[in-house]
Amino acid sequence: MNSAQDPDRGNRKLVVFGILGVTVLAMASMAIGKYSVPPSAILRVLFAGLTGGQPDVDPIQQTVIWNVRLPRVIAGLLIGAALAAAGATYQGLFRNPLVSPDILGVSAGASLGAVLAIFLKMPVPVIQLMSFCGGLLAVAAVYGVGAAVRGRDPVLTLVLAGVAIGAIVGAGISLVKILADPYDQLPAITYWLLGSLTAVTRADVGSILPAMVIGLLPLVALRWRMNVMTLGDEEAQTLGVDTRLMRLALIFGATLITAASVSIAGIVGWVGLVIPHVARLLVGPDFRRLLPAALLLGGGYMLVVDTLARSVALTEIPLGILTAVVGAPFFLWLLASGKRGWS
Amino acid sequence: MLELRDLAFGYGTRQVGGGVSLILRPGEVLALLGPNGAGKTTLFKTMLGLLAPLGGEVLLDAAPLETLDRKERARRIAYVPQAHAALFPFTVRDVVLMGRAAQVAPFSAPVRNDREVAAAALERLGMAHLSDRPYTEISGGERQMTLIARALAQQPKVLVMDEPTASLDYGNQMRVLGHVRRLAREGMAVVLSTHNPDHVFMVADRVAMLHDGALAALGPPADVLTVERVKQLYNIDVVMGVLPGGSSQVCSPRLGPGD
């Protein structure tokens, strides 16, 4: 009988192993590429970078690691972790294992913002800002509709409002694509809509870090209460949970980290749908374990995919293509094998 | 303990029923009997504070329900929904632990005491051996017991059970009713809804008969649950009596010659 055992304790082992695994992946990702760098040089560059000294390595290696691959690795980790955590949150909150981080129109809104900024020939930081704002605006609109409709199942209302607003925003994106310059802007728009970390800089990573931290806070803080929310609105209420406030805080957090991810990497599909399933298979549905597992798996998965994206072909493959090609068959396999973390 | 005073209930502006007054006493099982659409579920939701009363009031320990915050309510009145299919495979222990939500601080997780209360609730219902099983893989009867254990983990004074025997097999129906009886003997006040007059005779101290949103009768089953009332509620002819060797009245339908 281990009824009095603290489940958080089992968590620590999981987190330590996960961090170890992700660290190895990060090292590998920094070593692999058209210009390969030995691990010892990576360590020296990182150490020098952190202490502010001058590493005793080839300056090209230093530039490749410090200015190109490190920001990209950190961005990949952040984005994969954020999308997976947001997906796990939305799936629990909406009690539907088929929803992904873009269920409330956040990706569509972010896309419209970015596409519009590209169309208006804005510089990159403005593209990111407009994408971020677009995502938040779309979700605010969906949430506003959901709050205005009373007396219906609030979860279903939100999902349906998300579908409708997403369609309107999608129409806007299509319109901008038609109007865009087909030789100059359209390829940029298309590339952005498929997701990529090619142009990520240290400044980009810094710019999304605050949103990531603020967005993750409610998810971490409410990690046990999240379990109760999966029972549905009425049951959770009879158990003493303020479901409106909970839903607001969790949607806010998950949306913020999704919008931050989309704003620098574009649309990277499937991560937020598939990774939470894999995490649930590995550690079960308890959000106290599911959240760290999703964060680590999502981050690790994104590292692998991004490393593949920049090393398997002469030109970079957009992330969205790879995540779909890897994610969709895997998802089908999950369905067919009955290894689902839900029923 | 729980008192309804001239309660009118419904959704928004649509009133489903009204004029319901009753007092639930500790250690009492009150059965709510009524046909589909009579307003049982709406009445329950109003008693639980999920719907605001359209008139009259719900008093919990002499305090109007709306003056108590959600947590305070959850510590006094617990809801046992019908055994449902859960989406995610939480273990039975985790499901029961969710009954502690009102005692756990918002940003916190259950502590040792909460886990002990949850384990004791499972023990009390003879469910401890299923603690580690996923809720999605146990039988309907076991799910219903898990939900009762979750309600017990709230350490409430009142249990509100929505058709606790629906969708259970015959044996599990009787086992659940047996547990209801025992909980009442230990001081719990229980309100449950049912469609089965036999279950009312077996388990209830009093029966409230709901017809078109109004109380058609309220009293001990032997006094008010009569052949005429069943005919009024469900529009079928029945006979009632105690079978030789039986312990409580049973109700048996009679099909007319045209049926």
Image (tube, rainbow, N blue to C red):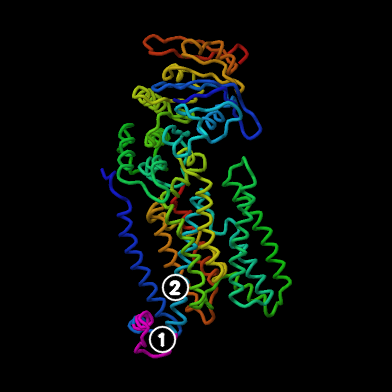
Q: Is residue A166 above or below residue A51?
A: above
Which residue is farthest left?
Answer: A1
Along the polypeptide, which appears first: circle 2 or circle 1? Answer: 1
On what subunit does the disc labeled 1 rest? A
Dot 1: within a 10 Å radius of its alpha carbon, few (fewer than 14), some, or many (20 or more) residues?
A: many
Q: Which residues are magenta?
A: A44-63
Q: Is residue A146 above or below residue B31?
A: below
On what subunit does the disc labeled 2 rest? A
Please name the residue shown 35% across and 42% down the image: B93
Residue B48 percent coordinates (x, y): 50, 33
Q: Quadrant of the N terminus of chain A?
A: top left
Between B245 and A219, the residue placed more toward the observer is A219
Question: Which numbered marker is on residue A74?
Answer: 2
Dot 2: within a 10 Å radius of its alpha carbon, few (fewer than 14), some, or many (20 or more) residues?
A: some
Q: Is residue A325 above or below residue B51?
A: below
Q: Magenta region, mostly helix, strand or loop?
A: helix
Q: CA distance from mark 2 to mark 1?
A: 16 Å
Q: Secondary structure at mark 2?
A: helix
Residue B47 percent coordinates (x, y): 51, 30
**Amino acid type at mark 1:** Gln
Q: Which residue is mark 1?
A: A62
| Left or right of B203, for residue A152 | right
| Left or right of B113, for residue B167 | right
Figure quadrant of residue A9: bottom left
Q: Is residue A49 magenta?
A: yes
How many numbered discs sit on the rendered protein?
Answer: 2
Q: Secondary structure at mark 1?
A: helix
Please name the residue shown 67% across and 61% down the image: A169
Q: Is residue A68 magenta?
A: no
Please name the residue shown 43% across and 60% down the image: A294
Between A162 and B45, the residue placed more toward the observer is B45
